[in-house]
Image (spheres, rainbow, N blue to C red):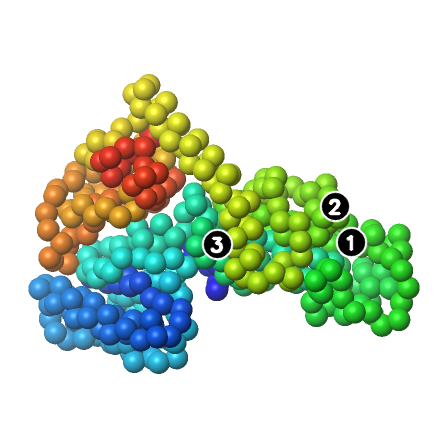
Amino acid sequence: MTGTTVMKDELRTLLDPHEPPCLSLYLQTHRRHPENQQDPIRYKNLLKALEESILNQYSGVEAGTLLTPFQALSVDADFWNHCWDGLAVFGAAGLFRVIKLQRPVGELAVAAKSFHVKPLLRVLQSADRYQVLSLNRHQVRLFEGDRDQLDEVELAAGVPRTITEALGSELTEPHQTVASYGGTTRGSSATHGHGSKTDEEGIDEERYFRAVDRAILHNHSRSSGMPLILAALTQYHTQFRKISRNPFLTDVGIEVDANSLSIEQLRQRAWTAAEPEIRSHLRKLTDAFEEARSKGRGSDDLAEVARAAAKARVESLFVESDRLIPGHLDLATGAAALTGMDNPGVDDLLDDLAELVLNKGGQVIVAPSLDMPTRTGVAAIFRY
């Protein structure tokens, strides 16, 4: 899994202007046989709906060109045998993106003037997601998850994987012969005949933790905004927390080497640690909206919020994850017109509104109905 940082880069690309039509396809997929056998069939059915939508406004030649990479994906057997829980596929002139998702999404095929990104935002937004930093003396790993799933993610290029990578030539001599190919369940690795831990090794350990802390904050935590849960032996918690400058590091961690746990055991412990902080974060966001509304700086009226978004007045926007409001949004004025979803010029108003707020520098929180502060599908906190 490439992780949230990479997906946010993809999102920025999708939010850039593109020549219409912009094709967006979402599908729930499955990780295992036999459930995954129906995935390519359902994907092909969505492709047919996408083609019909395009042909309402464009020629068969144009439709064929746009759909060619979509169709090639439909017959890639290796791809369909290695899916996760959801799939997002985007296409336009000169662009084709396939993103595997860690959570299920509703089936949707849309051809519109811009990409439909709300389901992708639902996966990316940090309100109910977390990261786990697995750390021992010789190995660094990172995971991302939510209540139901946890997957290891690829570390960014600037993050050291081992103490040797972190310290390089500055590593003291006893460490030079310590194998860095992974920790045991006790968090240590095989040695080649050297003695007990020295004071120099203790200094190395502190410098190693500092390097990891800086790299994780710079390359992962700042971009994701997710709570970071430390999974390490108890003694490493004390040392790491003493030197850490990562504001996303949670107070509650997992006091065991993650290498000794199955991925499911790690997920269970991680969610137990993450859930209280996530619930607290959502309550703070909701309270902030209620306070803003009481002072005339918040609204749940779609038309009012859209006009404010066009003027860059929206500081934070809540949109309901599973609600679609078909229509067209004038990005210049914020005028919203309700209509149907049966032609390439129409998308979900909530999706368009979320894109507009992001492009104006606002925050977007895509939440399920139970966590929404209103029942209209939208809520906004205004800058003024």
Where 296 falls versus 65 (above or below)?
above
- Tell me the SS state at disc 2: helix
> Looking at the rendering, which quadrant does residue 303 occupy?
top left
Neighbor class of circle 3 (other Cα within 10 Å; few <14, some 14-19, many 20+) is: many
* Quadrant of the rendering where the C terminus is positioned: top left
Drawn side of residue 88 relative to residue 146, left or right: left
Earlier along the polypeptide chain: callout 3 or callout 1? 3
The disc at residue 145 is 3
Q: Position of residue 3 (x, y in %)?
A: 48, 59
> Looking at the rendering, which quadrant does residue 296 occupy?
top left
**Residue 307 seen by the camera:** no
Image point 12% across, 67% down: which residue? 52
Nearer mark to the viewer, of 3 and 1: 3
**Cα distance in 3D space between marks 2 and 3:** 25 Å
Q: Circle 2 is placed at which residue position?
A: 239
- Tell me the SS state at disc 3: strand
Earlier along the polypeptide chain: callout 2 or callout 3? 3
Q: Nearer the viewer, residue 226 or 96?
A: 226
Q: Position of residue 94 (x, y in %)?
A: 30, 68
Neighbor class of circle 2 (other Cα within 10 Å; few <14, some 14-19, many 20+) is: some
* Mark 3 touches mark 1? (CB < 8 Å): no
- Tell me the SS state at disc 1: helix
Q: Position of residue 199 (x, y in %)?
A: 89, 52
In the displayed orientation, state which residue is furthest to the top.
295
- Disc 2 residue type (three-letter): Gln
Image point 31% across, 75% down: which residue? 37
Q: Circle 1 is placed at which residue position?
A: 205
* Mark 2 touches mark 1? (CB < 8 Å): yes
Drawn side of residue 310 relative to residue 215, left or right: left
- Disc 3 residue type (three-letter): Gly
Nearer mark to the viewer, of 2 and 1: 2
